[in-house]
Image (spheres, coloured by chain):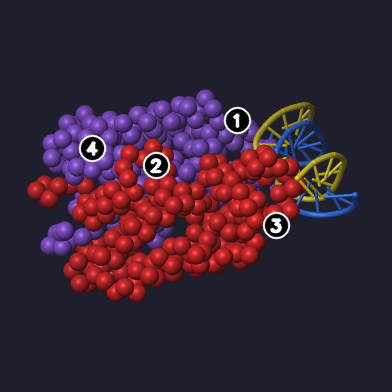
Chain colours: A purple, B red, C yellow, D blue
Amino acid sequence: MTNKTKLRISPRKEKIFRAAAELFREKGYTASSMRDLASKVNLEVSSLYSHIRSKEEILIDICFQCAENYMTGINAIIEKNQTTVESLKEVIALHVNIALKDETSVTVFNDEWKHLSEPHLGRFLALRNDYEFKLESIIRQGIQSGQIRDLEPKLIMNTLLSSLHWLHYWKKRTVSPKKLIDQMKEIICNGLVMNENFE
Amino acid sequence: MTNKTKLRISPRKEKIFRAAAELFREKGYTASSMRDLASKVNLEVSSLYSHIRSKEEILIDICFQCAENYMTGINAIIEKNQTTVESLKEVIALHVNIALKDETSVTVFNDEWKHLSEPHLGRFLALRNDYEFKLESIIRQGIQSGQIRDLEPKLIMNTLLSSLHWLHYWKKRTVSPKKLIDQMKEIICNGLVMNENFE
DNA sequence: CCTACCGATCGGTAGG
DNA sequence: CCTACCGATCGGTAGG
């Protein structure tokens, strides 16, 4: 079922990690204190350390688990060897699905990774570069084959990625997940403007 | 020249504010200490307080100055009473221009406002709601008149805004400001996909 | 603008 | 899992 089952999933530990992720999303990693976390799971501060090694261990865990989700996703998409447009649509679906499944981690992944300390920060940035390189390759291929607009690839990639990065913030969602994915595909692939107004 | 000239612009104070904005962008507001800031401007910590009232005063100043730039911009656009598509293109240019002119403030504006404390946080959120209401109105008008795709307006608005929010991050820009604005307009209005591949 | 210093809070540990 | 506690660092002040 789970592809990388950790041996140390005690329910208590799980609860602490989830609470921490929520806290990090709301206040940011640095502004979240172990006191905040402890009171959120009804423990004393010192008791947390029976379950976790340090505050940073939580951040590391969240960041790399999330990175792995993205990496696994994009690798699967690349292996399918589809048209660029199909691949990009699956990338959109991937990001929406991750954002919906785990709303907290995406924030952490986007905003809080910079608080990782050094061997971890380097490893994380390497993963991120790897992901972006793969995505940019898809885009470049699409430009060469005339499927994608001939604009600066880095601009396309960053616009694509960041247009997906608000989803975890949308609390009161008014559309279903399926409809959300469809609408995001439409708006990103075809733009805001109706085609008759194409200029 | 400057539309809201502050009486208390000493060059020293300006220097401190700029250094703080950079620091907040790199490390985040909470992780930036007054010690960091002091050493960045070659002062002792206590000397900072001859120029500023508190750490939060800097954040407040940055957030509201930036908010004012956006508000002034969108109000000017609305007053012109153009077509929706023209208005949205000007919104895109507005965001790109603010991001290029003041790279630090945008990050702070996007990510660090949540660390404002209470009377300020409320005021800030009110401004933000006002801005988003105005932008959403433009979009709704565009949908009604058939210029904009008939998708959930909040989804369009958030996708639009967040697709513009990575710009301050792009250090090694490879395109000129003018080209950047043109490419952002094209990608946001017309989408990634070339029209012959329209599906 | 500095020296000297403060109370509060931080992440984390000892020991049970 | 708790009580008790630690050294480090925080934002900020007194006084000159």
Chain holding disc 1: A
The residue that disc 1 covers is A53
The amino acid marked with disc number 1 is Arg
Left or right: A113 in relation to B197: right
Label 4: how many Cα within 10 Å (few below 14, some 14–19, many 20+): many
The residue that disc 4 covers is A139
Q: CA distance from mark 3 to mark 2?
A: 32 Å
Circles 2 and 1, Cβ within 8 Å, touching? The answer is: no
Which of discs 4 and 1 lies nearer the camera? The answer is: 4
Residue B170 is tagged as 2
Q: CA distance from mark 2 to mark 1?
A: 36 Å
Is label 4 in a helix, a strand or a loop? helix
Circles 4 and 1, Cβ within 8 Å, touching? The answer is: no
Is label 3 in a helix, a strand or a loop? loop
The amino acid marked with disc number 2 is Trp
Q: CA distance from mark 2 to mark 4?
A: 18 Å
Q: CA distance from mark 4 to mark 3?
A: 49 Å
Which of discs 2 and 1 lies nearer the camera? The answer is: 2
Residue at x 46%, y 62% (from the top left corner):
B69
Residue B53 is tagged as 3
Q: CA distance from mark 4 to mark 1?
A: 41 Å
Chain holding disc 3: B
The first of marks 3 and 2 along the sequence is: 3
The first of marks 4 and 1 along the sequence is: 1
